Amino acid sequence: MTAYRVRRRANPSGGPARRLARLVPHTDPVAVTGIGLSIALSVALDLTGAASGVESLLAGLLGTTVSLLVDSMARAERRFELRTLVAGTPWMNEALGPIVAGTREAIEHYPGTPVAAEARSRFDRFRIETEHLRTGRIVRSGDDYRDLAGAVRDCVTRLDAMANVAPRTGEASWWSTDFGRYYWTLNLDALARGVRISRIFGYHTYSDELRELVETQRRAGVRVGLLPYGTVDRSLDLNLAVWDGTSAWQGRTGPHGEISENVFSVNPDDLDRLVAAFRTCERAATFTDPPVGRD
């Protein structure tokens, strides 16, 4: 097992090497370049005799001053931009500070350890997840269906969905899992509220298990359509749901048809794409209206 040497926190400032290491990331290359050129100019003027010693010194000081002034203005602009972004959301002032401070302390106090690596990794994941949210999407793991359940509970008028059974076996066992059964109870609650549900099942083989599932949903009042694989373009073999035309879900699948990611979206482009996909499959599917007397 590899042993990691963790620095003591008794002296937070550390030695000169540590202070230099902390200073370097905050050094603006533009300022360093400007100061370097100013010093070089001052030395060149003095060595060539193009200016007196005092004039060479003044030229170097002037160049250094201008470089530091430009650097200061750039830093102030960045701070102002960040302050403007944060000021628009009051709670962010309180939340952002501890997140940044905690990540920085973990990296600086425990360099070269799994703690520092994990701190950077979590910060990167936070950035990626924020980018998803920025585009109106929530991306979760394949076994996290909380958004799918929540959207059904909040649905008011209409739910359009497509479900593709596992392509290798043609079975529909997802509906018999714990969440599948819970999701079906949410569907029944939605039907009781007057929500209209249309669901298309894509399949390779119309197995007895799938037939029983279809009959159960039809008896409950779901408008069920059947769509054999190959009827539409393969790009439309999707697992999706659209609620009231305002939010949508897509289950991204792995190589064997299993859900690998759950993507909930209110992005207008996603809504248009998934609604169009459902309408295309709806036109190609075979529907049977639910019986008048339903359970």
Image: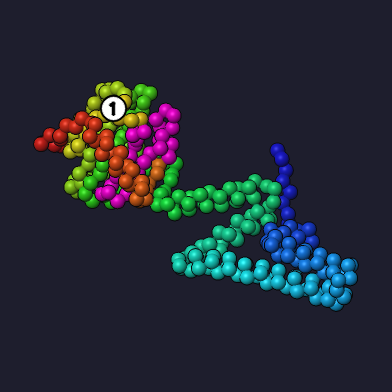
Q: Quadrant of residue 100?
A: bottom right
Q: How is the image coloured?
A: rainbow
- Residue at coordinates 80% horizontally, 76% vertically from top-left? 58
- Mark 1: give few (<14), some (14-19) or many (20+) Cα within 10 Å: few
Is 56 in the magenta? no
Q: Amino acid at mark 1?
A: Thr
Q: Is residue 161 visible?
A: no
Horizontal side of residue 53 vs 166, given as left or right: right
The image shows residue 196, relative to residue 284, as above or below, that is below
Write down the region rendered in magenta.
235-261
Horizontal side of residue 237 vs 27, given as left or right: left
- Farthest front residue in view: 50
The residue that mark 1 highlights is 231
Image location of residue 288, percent across then percent down: 16, 31
Callout 1 secondary element = loop
Image location of residue 137, percent across then percent down: 41, 49
- Residue at coordinates 56% horizontally, 52% vertically from top-left? 123
- Residue at coordinates 88% horizontally, 67% vertically from top-left? 48
Image quadrant in which the N terminus is located: top right
The image shows residue 294, relative to residue 269, as above or below, that is above
Horizontal side of residue 68 vs 51, given as left or right: left
Image location of residue 210, percent across then percent down: 27, 27
